[in-house]
Amino acid sequence: MINTESSLFGVRFIGSGSAVPDRVLTNNDLAQMVDTTDEWIASRTGIRERHIADGAGDSVANLAAQAGQKAIAAAGLAPQDIDLIILSTSTSDDLFGTAGRVQKILGAEHAVAFDLVAACSGFVFGLVTASQYIQTGAYKNVLLIGADVLSRWVDWQDRRTCILFGDGAGALVVQASNPSHPQNNLLGFEMRSDGRGNDLLNINYLGRSTFESITMNGQEVYRFAVRRVPEVIEKSLHKANLEVHDLDWLIMHQANQRIIDAVVNRFGIDPAKAVSNMGKYGNTSAASIPIALDEWVQAGKIQADHLIAIAGFGAGLSWGSAVFRWG
């Protein structure tokens, strides 16, 4: 832990990791379960397959810990170096929270740990939260994890929703920069909520310790995303004194390829800059952005000093964007 009574600390992003269950459920597999086809799903969503939890070993805690271990190693740290763990999840293994279990599995004995619930915006909200703790000097090394196992709450007979969701976890180590040379790589952010749209995407409590399956008004969520997401990206870029064409990468929540395409067309940017891996993973909620980030880092596509904008959106309704420099 670090403390300061003077200037704010800078923020760096130094290591990523991800983990998904071994079991793969393809569109053709789903066609054996509900009235659908691979072509119908792929043409409307961009999704071809998704990873699905299969047993206790694929708990949120285990997937989050696996991703966290990789991110800590990539950052050149040990679990004992982590001061704070933020677990962004809407599908906790325990209603009292899962971050403590992740801390135990990792052996991060010095870390404070808590859950953050903001659905598919969770990783963006978590990144901003982690950065505030660092900038004020409260903590030096923060492990931010986005992890969800939405397959627990899918109605596998509802073809409108069962085709969309997958399970997984992604992690990022956020670190304070040297106070003598405070490089702040979080350049701008914007977060929004509108509870008037809360009923568009839900997993509601039904009583007697049970919850309903995922319900979603897909058309309205799509309209909300293509209208609101570009606005927060523009605002976060404005705060960073950047233009969209300055970006090396745009990593949006992996909900639907048509949403990504609509935002790309709105900005007129090179589609190759818009990261997309939903074809392999589907919508993994708070995990989707960090899984995509880690895949591009591992492939050597994201390099030091690259400018990245991320954008999340989903239940709440909530949406937000952050612009940062990698490294």
Image (cartoon, rainbow, N blue to C red):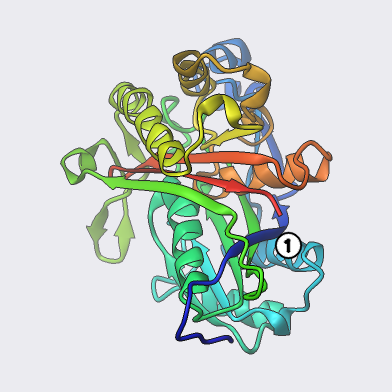
- Percent across and percent down for residue 159 are 45, 25
Indicate left or right for 41 with 66 as reference.
left
Nearer to us in this view, 55 or 113? 113
Give the residue drawn at x 43%, y 34%.
233
> Few, some or many C-alpha atoms within 10 Å of disc 1 (few <14, some 14-19, many ≥20)?
many
Which residue is found at the position 49% from the left and 70% from the top? 135
- Residue 213 vs residue 16: left or right? left
Residue 59 seen anywhere in this rendered image of the structure: no
Q: In this view, does 211 lie to the left or right of 72?
A: left
Q: What residue type is labelled 1?
A: Ala
Q: Position of residue 289 (x, y in %)?
A: 58, 44
* Quadrant hosting residue 215: top left
| Residue 168 visible, this angle | yes
Instruction: Tell which of 262 and 254 is nearer to you.
Output: 262
Residue at the disc numbered 1: 71
Instruction: Give the position of the C terminus as an image quadrant.
Output: bottom right
**Picture residue at 55% right of the left edge, 18% below the top:** 41
Q: Taking 191 as reference, is 220 above or below it? A: above
| Secondary structure at numbered mark 1 | helix
Q: Is residue 199 left or right of residue 36?
A: left
Q: How many marks?
A: 1
User: In this rendering, is residue 311 above or below 221?
Assistant: below
Comparing 133 with 166, the one in front is: 133
Quarter holding the N terminus is bottom right
Residue 37 placement (x, y as % from top left): 58, 14
Query: Is 242 situated above or below 273?
Result: below
